[in-house]
Image (tube, rainbow, N blue to C red):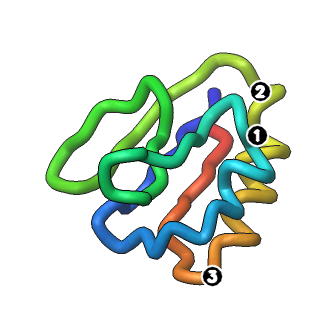
Amino acid sequence: MVVVTLQRDKCIGCNYCVEMAPEQFAMSKKDGKSVLLRSKDKKGFHTIKSHDDVIYDNCEKASKACPVKIIDVKQV
């Protein structure tokens, strides 16, 4: 299982996550910040849990590309 967490409040809107993992991330037209698609928000931490291990590589690339280091990716 892959767990991806985004601290959306700290997003600066650089768009790297969308470039690296467009299936999991999008940019909000409302405020220009990243959105973790199909995620649940809990106190500013947006999280998805997926049994699809294929998403791990792209989400890991997005995590490494993020200049403010607000994306966490774990394989459990």
> Badge 3, how many Cα within 10 Å: few under 14, some, many 20+?
few
Cα gap from disc 3 to disc 2, whole angstroms = 24 Å
Task: Please name the residue shown 83% across and 27% down the image.
Answer: 54
Disc 3 target residue: 67
The amino acid type found where label 2 is placed reads: Asp
Cα gap from disc 2 to disc 1, whole angstroms = 6 Å
Identify the secondary structure beneath mark 3: loop
Identify the secondary structure beneath mark 2: loop
Image quadrant occupied by the C terminus:
top right
Task: Please name the residue shown 64% across and 17% down the image.
Answer: 51
Cβ–Cβ under 8 Å for marks 1 and 3:
no
The amino acid type found where label 3 is placed reads: Pro
Disc 1 target residue: 56
Cβ–Cβ under 8 Å for marks 2 and 1:
yes
- Point out the tag, 1 or 3, that comes first from the N-terminus: 1
The amino acid type found where label 1 is placed reads: Tyr
In this image, 13 relative to 63: left or right?
left
Against 76, residue 12 (above or below) is below
